[in-house]
Image: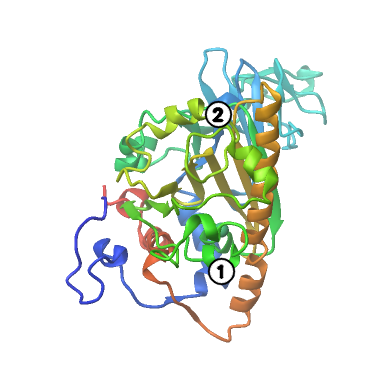
Amino acid sequence: MNIETKSPVPGFDDSYTLALGLDTGPLSTDPYISPAHYELERERVFGRAWLAMGREEQVPESGSYIVRELEVCNASVLIVRQKSGGIQAFHNVCSHRQNLIMNSSEGRAPRFTCRYHSWTFGTDGALLSVPDERRFFDFDKKKCGLTPIATEVWQGWIFINMQSEPEVSLAEFLGDFGKFYTGVPFPGSGHSLKFEANLDANWKVISDAFAESYHVPSIHNKTLRPAFSNASNPFARPIRASAWGPHSAYSAFANLEYAPPENALGERLAYRNMGANNIISPSGANEIDKLLGHPSINPNNSAEWCSDANVIFPNFHLDVSFGGFFIHHFWPTSHRSTRWVAEYFMEPAADFQTRLQQEYYAIRNIEVLLEDIGNTERVQKGMETRAKRNIYLQDGEVIIRNLLHHIDRWIKADSAREALDL
Ligand SMILES: [Fe+2]
């Protein structure tokens, strides 16, 4: 639902939290620090939800593959473009002695050979050849193919589900968000600038750092604050919040008066080729305009818009700004560690000006992202002191509250269908 209703609570007649029907009280730190809670998340959230893995452009041709380690699911996942054109994920596990087959994170191969004893599998998972096969007992090659993992693609995004027979389809899982976001073009989706870090913090500590703009005037004081707040909105309150069950979105505010200072020569060069107000961009306005023209981007059509963050449950952010689109994956590796991967998509530069823009865009993003993640391990340590057992969320942090609410719901529900209210 889009939040447009007015709250009856005095002083909060524009509350996103109340309009969403969420509680307003403090929240327990348990989901961030408890190993037992993490085990429940593994089984009931990550074990039942559809999980975004990447773009279909990352496996462009028959035999193209990517490998993703999913510690949270005790899985190594091999995702392969099929001869038929479809995409199928398998456990990256040899049927013989269970060695992990493919070591590189991406590539293209006509078949997959386990380096231990050279058992060889086709791109469709079928076991093709076994050295000295006649010495195995009662052996049926047909029963020894790779184990498939449920795979579906939505708008070019590859999702998997670790249930052997998923309770809900990807369309059911994405629900009204999936319908709302249909037809959005993703320019430059075959090429990205990728950042990856392993952080000693619960995965939600990292995802929370990208789920609100309240922190912008504070932690991004010298970088983003002048462009993303002003006298009328000094605390960078979001200009819109929406939720569709467990999935949610907010739009961030742009200060239309902002211009790069005289001495910001790099920023001014990067601006030269822009059709938009105050966001640096890795490409010309034409490519980005196709994206920004879709009605689901900046859905309230606000002039003071700079970006949308779409939080796809549980651990995937699909974001759009004047710079194009970018994503975050937050992969838990334990209850207090996370592999965070961010990718900023863009067409490869075809000329010097664009290359310069992209270099500046990269430097700028690294600076800002370091501010975001630089705080997260300290948050985890603070929570683990157990000096305090609650966190407080203000109205602008509603997306974090929605995520915590739905994680709790999935943990308590007997089925994914029940958690989704289907
Ligand atoms: Fe930030």
Left or right relative to 89: residue 64:
right
Q: Nearer the viewer, residue 118 or 236?
A: 236
Ligand 1 lies under 8 Å from the Cβ of mark 1: no
Height in image: 338 above or below 173? below
Q: Residue 315: image x %, image y %?
A: 51, 51
Q: Quadrant of ligand 1?
A: bottom right
Secondary structure type for disc 1: helix
Q: Residues within 10 Å of mark 2 (few under 14, many from 20)?
A: some
The tag earlier along the polypeptide, 2 or 1, is 1
Residue to which mark 2 is pinned:
284
Q: Quadrant of residue 181?
A: top left
Foreground mark, 2 or 1, reads 2
Height in image: 166 above or below 240? above
Q: Nearer the viewer, residue 331 or 135?
A: 331
Point out the residue furthest to the front here.
262
Q: Quadrant of residue 282?
A: top right
Which residue is drawn at the image coordinates 27% and 61% (left, top)?
20
Q: Amino acid at mark 2?
A: Gly
Q: Quadrant of residue 133?
A: top right
Height in image: 239 above or below 88? below
Residue 145 appears in the rendering: yes
Point out the residue furthest to the left here.
8
Residue to which mark 1 is pinned:
218
* Circles 2 and 1: CB atoms closer than 8 Å: no
Ligand 1 lies under 8 Å from the Cβ of mark 2: no
